[in-house]
Every structure is written in structure tokens, then in C-alpha cells.
Amino acid sequence: MREIKAEIIHGDCVNVLSEYSDNMFDLIVTSPPYADKRKNTYGGMAPDKYVEWFLPRSEQFLRVLKPTGTFILNIKEKAENGERHTFVLELILALRKQGWLWTEEFIWHKKNCYPGKWPNRFRDAWERCLQFNKTRHFKMNQKAVMVPMGDWANARLKSLGKNDVVRFDSQVRSGFGKNIANWVGREKAYPTNVLHLATECSNKEHSAAFPEALPEWFIKLFTDEGDTVLDPFVGSGTTCAVAQRMRRNSVGIEILAEYCGLAKEDIAVGDYQLFEKGGRNARRNGSKNH
Ligand SMILES: C[S@@+](CC[C@H](N)C(=O)[O-])C[C@H]1O[C@@H](n2cnc3c(N)ncnc32)[C@H](O)[C@@H]1O
């Protein structure tokens, strides 16, 4: 079996990546520090300065990503003075100018988001996962993320009259996939661009850790075994731990030494132990009880 490498590097990703050659990575999946967030843990920059801060880093991402690769950016703008800030929208436009294609936007619906009350809005239950690519011909294993068709198929699809199907078909001038009649009786469907995932709510020692299912989904969709994944803001190392379990090589970069230590713990434990113990949180909880 081919050896799988996982590496956690301490430093600012802009400097660390400047040492890497072009076109090294198949997937970049990351959640950077959000503007003005978490000032007490790992800094945070003013929303107005965010694009300026991000662009030198994304320039490196663009250089080290393979032409067939994908960049997934998990980010969400907060509300300020009663309005949503526009820095994410500005960032999208700036990234396009930098040479990225903005190919898709996935919504991460946080299934278990906690209740709250604000004077002029409801609780925030979703974040963006923006997809950027270098070319239109990127690797995408759509079959790897198919989902059970579910009961709605019987009720909704089978009740379509012949005319409905024909009308639908002629409206969209579709190929096989867009013609709903072709999906009747099938067990699996392709997912939508909304991911319904719980946030990580166990006692991980990083305040903004990914749920493992988030990088897992994108790794399945955009890479094959043996490919190489980069998380330039790796925090507690979720992306690398998951990549290792899925037999993908990975590099994680983290500016704070304490998080690097945390991330390295999981990498050292390795894939089989993580599986056996029910994931990294189970292992951490277990070790705390002893
Ligand atoms: C939102 S957290 C990522 C959490 C991660 N997804 C996880 O599962 O633990 C962002 C991380 O980026 C790190 N960071 C901030 N600026 C950085 C930089 N310039 N280079 C590398 N890491 C940085 C922060 O210390 C923080 O741990």
C-alpha cells in the first residue's frame, strides 16, 4: 500500500507556501480567520482590511493548486451596525480579478446551531463554502457523494403526469440528468449544493473547528486516493486528520504553535486508530477521562 504523508507546518501560510513549487495540490479546503472574529484567540482583522490581507495568500494558493484542482473557502460575513458586511462579496470579486473562477457556492447549513434572539434578525444557521477553480475542467467525482433518493421520490416524481414530464423536458432542453423522468425508480441521486451538517460541539480545544464531515465531503468530491490536500489555516488539524483517514496526503499550515501541537497529535495517532476510537473527538474525550 502506498505511504500517505500528513504534515503540519508552523508559520504564516503566505511565507510557508512561497517555498512550494507550482501546481502541487489537488484540493485546498480551508476556513480562514473571519474578519473581526476571535480577537482573543487568534487575532482577526478589520473587515475593511480583509481583502488586502487575503490576496497575497490566495495568490500563493492559486500558484500551488494544480490546474485540475479546487479551492474551497469556508467563510461568513458578520452583521455590523445593523447590516451584513460586504467584505466577502468584495473578496469574491477580488479573487476573480486575481485569476480564479468562482465556480460554485455551497451553503453549509448548521443543523445544530444554538438558539438566540436579536432585535433585527434571526439566528445565523449557515455559512458559505465558496468554490474557486483555475480552469473549467477540474476533477469532480460526483458519484462519490451520491445520496439515497429518499421517500420524496416516490411521492413527487411518480405523481408527475405525462404532460408534466414532457413540459419539464422541453423547457429545460435537458440532457439525461435534467429530465426528472429519468430519476424515477433510482435508488440514488446527486446531492444539492446545500450541506446539512452539525457544527462540532464536543470539547475540541479549538473554538472554530470544522466538523469532520465538512472536509470529508469536499475531499471525496474533489480528490482521489493518493492526491494531496492543503489547509493553509489548519487550526486544530481537522482537514489533515480526515485526509489521512481517507488516504490522501495533506499539508496543514497554522500560525499559532499551540494549535500546531493539537493538529500534530491527530496526525501522529494515524488513520486506523482514529477509525477504531470513533474519531478524534472520541479519542480526546476518552483521554480526558483517564
Ligand atoms: C477558523 S480557524 C481554522 C479551524 C480549522 N478548520 C479546524 O478544524 O480546526 C483559522 C485558523 O487559522 C490560523 N491562522 C490565522 N492566520 C494565519 C496565517 N496567516 N497562516 C496560517 N494560519 C493562520 C488561526 O490561528 C486559526 O487557528
Image (spheres, rainbow, N blue to C red):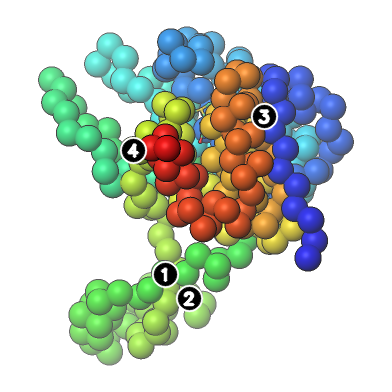
Residue 113: name its quadrant: top left
- Check disc 4 and give the amino acid type: Cys
Label 1 close to label 4 by CB (< 8 Å): no
Residue sitting nearer the eye, 218 or 276:
276
Rendered residue at 60%/57% (across/down) = 272
Q: Position of residue 250 (x, y in %)?
A: 70, 44
Q: Is residue 81 above or below residue 208?
A: above
Q: Nearer the viewer, mark 3 or mark 2?
A: 3
Circle 1 sits on which residue?
147
- Check disc 3 and give the amino acid type: Ile
Q: Secondary structure at mark 2?
A: loop
Of labels 1 and 3, earlier in sequence is 1
Q: Quadrant of the C terminus?
A: top left
Label 2 vs label 4: CA separation? 37 Å
Label 1 vs label 4: CA separation? 25 Å
In the drawing, does residue 94 fall left or right of residue 154? right
Q: Secondary structure at mark 3?
A: strand
Of labels 3 and 2, earlier in sequence is 2
- Check disc 2 and give the amino acid type: Gly
Label 1 vs label 3: CA separation? 32 Å
Rendered residue at 78%/35% (across/down) = 63
Circle 3 sits on which residue?
253
| CB at disc 3 and ligand 1 closer than 8 Å | yes
In the drawing, does residue 180 fall left or right of residue 231? left
Label 2 vs label 1: CA separation? 15 Å
Circle 4 sits on which residue?
201
Label 2 close to label 1 by CB (< 8 Å): no
Circle 2 sits on which residue?
177
